[in-house]
Image (cartoon, rainbow, N blue to C red):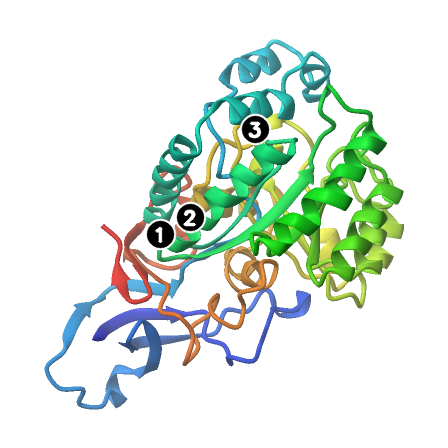
């Protein structure tokens, strides 16, 4: 099936297909063509260029994008979007002065989400999660990483991963599955015993069932140590699965260095970072993923994006969509927040939320840029003056159409 987009005010994020991510020094650049066209064939970008040079494509379906910008759909490389219920009561507790750690110590936080997951049926979890994800697709997300980690036992972690697999098969976007069994320590386990279950039983079984694209761990004080992280990453490496690490959210304890050592695809959060962490990231292929929505909701420090850029380190931004610390998957808001609080430009934010986000979830060969041969996962904005309008109007969704594999999402 063919589809043509014409009179595009600005066709944005044009890259060579072989570019896997945008380096720090080039994150302020966003290659584009003014007054452009783009041809879609069978869900893939087939051709694009200036309207003055458009070939005769014959009588095919056409979208007139006059005064509108076309760019790749958002690539959200960090989410917990398979969950059930919410934790709005904890939100009010924090407003009254309770800390994230205090709530967790009193049985809230991840453990509350775990009890909710354990109580819900697989079908209900699938339906609730699918509706949630359909909503964020309409807001522009074209690729999504989804973590387990609220099960905290064999049966419920398996349930979450099987739901993610069903979502992969039923939704048109790119979805990657991350096993985060080492998210917290369940009440009925000692840490070492639970970690052994995760490493020796859950991980090999779930990989054997073909339910795992990546492995993750929460490397943080009172959760899992650097040594725990190395054990898990080493086992994942032996089994042929790449790692992603939650680290440096509240403390810097060496999780970044461990991630780089084991070739982790990404290290995520990084609200707290020191010079040793910076040195570890330099020259590595591990992508930092910054989560400003979490800082906004919890009222904690924001990651120091400028420090990363000044040290030649690129990054991605993602939603961290979850019920406890960022109950939104709206990447339009996340991009606006990143500009406002991380003090980055529109170009840097869009690079972080498209191609660098795609790299951080292993799909940059398929999506994340306007490149011939990549999936036609595209956003068509409303009539706007420039890309700066996207973060400027922080409370609005300026995306008029979302095309996934060339088909409009209604």
Q: Give the quadrant of residue 236.
A: bottom right
Q: Is residue 16 above or below residue 351?
A: below
Discs 1, 2 touching: Cβ within 8 Å? yes
User: What quarter of the picture does the N terminus occupy?
Assistant: bottom left
Position in image of residue 59 (x %, y %): 10, 82
Q: CA distance from mark 1 to mark 2?
A: 6 Å
Q: Secondary structure at mark 3?
A: helix
| Residue located at (22% from left, 74% from top) | 3
* CA neighbours of label 2 inside 10 A, class few (<14), some (14 to 19), many (20+): few
Can residue 270 be seen here? The reply is no
Q: Secondary structure at mark 1?
A: helix
Q: Nearer the viewer, residue 15 or 135?
A: 135
- Which residue matches tag 1? 170
- Indicate which label's residue lies in the foreground, 3 or 1: 1
The residue that appears at 85% across and 53% down in the rendered structure is 257
Q: Is residue 334 above or below residue 328?
A: below
Q: Which residue is mark 2?
A: 166
């Amino acid at each position: 099936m063919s589809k043509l987009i014409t009179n595009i005010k600005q066709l944005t994020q044009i890259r060579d297909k072989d570019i896997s991510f945008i380096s720090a020094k080039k994150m302020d650049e966003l290659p584009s063509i003014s007054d452009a066209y783009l041809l879609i064939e069978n869900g893939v970008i087939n051709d694009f260029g200036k309207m003055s040079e458009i070939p005769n494509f014959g009588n095919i379906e056409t979208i007139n994008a006059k005064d509108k910008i076309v760019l790749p759909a958002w690539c959200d490389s960090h989410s917990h979007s398979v969950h059930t219920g919410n934790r709005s009561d904890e939100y009010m507790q924090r407003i009254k002065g309770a800390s994230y750690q205090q709530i967790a110590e009193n049985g809230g936080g991840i453990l509350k989400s775990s009890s909710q997951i354990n109580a819900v049926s697989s079908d209900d979890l699938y339906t609730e999660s699918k509706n949630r994800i359909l909503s964020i697709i309409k807001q522009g997300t074209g690729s999504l990483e989804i973590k387990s980690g609220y099960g905290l036992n064999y049966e419920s972690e398996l349930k979450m991963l099987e739901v993610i697999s069903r979502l992969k098969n039923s939704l048109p976007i790119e979805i990657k599955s991350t096993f985060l069994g080492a998210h917290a320590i369940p009440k009925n386990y000692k840490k070492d015993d639970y970690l052994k279950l995760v490493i020796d039983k859950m991980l090999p079984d779930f990989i054997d069932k073909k339910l795992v694209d990546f492995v993750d761990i929460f490397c943080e004080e009172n959760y899992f140590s650097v040594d725990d992280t190395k054990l898990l990453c080493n086992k994942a490496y032996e089994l042929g699965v790449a790692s992603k690490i939650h680290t440096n959210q509240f403390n810097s304890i060496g999780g970044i260095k461990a991630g780089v050592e084991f070739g982790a695809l990404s290290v995520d959060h990084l609200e707290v970072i020191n010079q040793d962490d910076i040195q570890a990231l330099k020259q590595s292929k591990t992508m930092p993923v910054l989560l400003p929505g979490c800082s906004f909701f919890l009222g904690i420090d924001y990651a120091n994006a400028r420090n990363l850029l000044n040290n030649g380190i690129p990054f991605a931004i993602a939603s961290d969509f979850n019920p406890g610390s960022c109950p939104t998957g709206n990447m339009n808001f996340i991009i606006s927040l990143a500009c406002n609080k991380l003090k980055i430009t529109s170009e840097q934010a869009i690079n972080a939320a498209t191609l660098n986000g795609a790299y951080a979830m292993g799909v940059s060969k398929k999506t994340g840029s306007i490149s011939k041969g990549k999936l036609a996962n595209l956003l068509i904005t409303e009539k706007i003056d420039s890309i700066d309008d996207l973060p400027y109007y922080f409370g609005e969704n300026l995306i008029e159409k979302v095309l996934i594999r060339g088909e409009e999402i209604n």
